[in-house]
Image (spheres, rainbow, N blue to C red):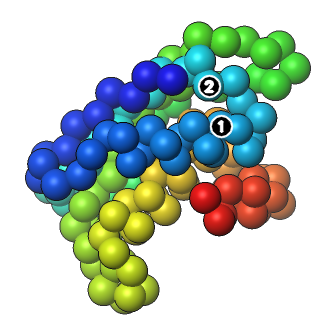
């Protein structure tokens, strides 16, 4: 697996997210010969992306941009899965509410984004989403 990582705050390490991604792919039975990007940014930048790609002019916690979606039957490898963008400001807000660390909240948002990149969608198939979410919850 190859993770292209950018942290606008320079506060977190790619290795923390690489480990989680590998565990998620294993639990979801997805070959980890995958490339994906993760960008940790602020509300201003994520709002611009949300406006540009979703026509929603407000910040959000996480955005996922899929490129290739894994197909378990075809066992396609060497996928470029896509990109995940996370607002560290939302993660900080959630950490205060949930009494968790910012890093823990970022990892939860990252797992949410990974599910989307893996082809799961809570808006179109909630039962499938919840099943996948349950499989990776304790990672």
Q: Nearer the viewer, residue 99 or 52?
A: 99
How many numbered circles are shown?
A: 2
**Residue, disc 1:** 25
| 67 horizontally vs 14: left or right | right
Residue 45 image position (x, y, % from top left): 17, 48
Within-10-Å neighbours for mark 2: few <14, some 14–19, many 20+ = some
Q: In percent of the image, x 30 and y 70: which residue is there?
A: 102
Residue 122 image position (x, y, % from top left): 67, 57
Q: In percent of the image, x 68 and y 56: which residue is there?
A: 136
SS for callout 2 = loop
Report if the CB atoms under discs 2 and 1 are less than 8 Å apart. Answer: yes
Determine the image quadrant of residue 120: top right
Within-10-Å neighbours for mark 1: few <14, some 14–19, many 20+ = some
SS for callout 1 = helix
**Residue, disc 2:** 32
Determine the image quadrant of residue 27: top right
| 63 horizontally vs 46: left or right | right
Residue 111 image position (x, y, % from top left): 54, 53
Q: In percent of the image, x 70 and y 38: which residue is there?
A: 26
Determine the image quadrant of residue 31: top right
Could you tell me if residue 46 is visible in this image?
Answer: no
Look at the picture and state if 47 lies above or below 14.
Answer: below
Could you tell me if residue 87 is visible in this image?
Answer: yes
């Amino acid at each position: 697996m190859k993770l292209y990582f950018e942290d606008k705050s320079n506060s977190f390490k790619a290795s923390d997210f690489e480990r989680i991604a590998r565990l998620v792919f294993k639990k979801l039975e997805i070959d980890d010969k995958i490339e994906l990007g993760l960008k940790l940014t602020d509300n201003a930048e994520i709002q611009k992306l949300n406006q540009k790609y979703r026509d929603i002019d407000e910040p959000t916690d996480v955005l996922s941009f899929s490129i290739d979606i894994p197909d378990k039957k075809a066992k396609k490898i060497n996928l470029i899965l896509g990109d995940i963008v996370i607002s560290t400001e939302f993660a900080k807000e959630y950490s205060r509410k949930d009494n968790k660390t910012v890093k823990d909240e970022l990892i939860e948002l990252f797992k949410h984004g990974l599910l989307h990149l893996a082809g799961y969608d809570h808006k179109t198939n909630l039962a499938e989403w919840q099943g996948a979410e349950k499989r990776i919850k304790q990672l």
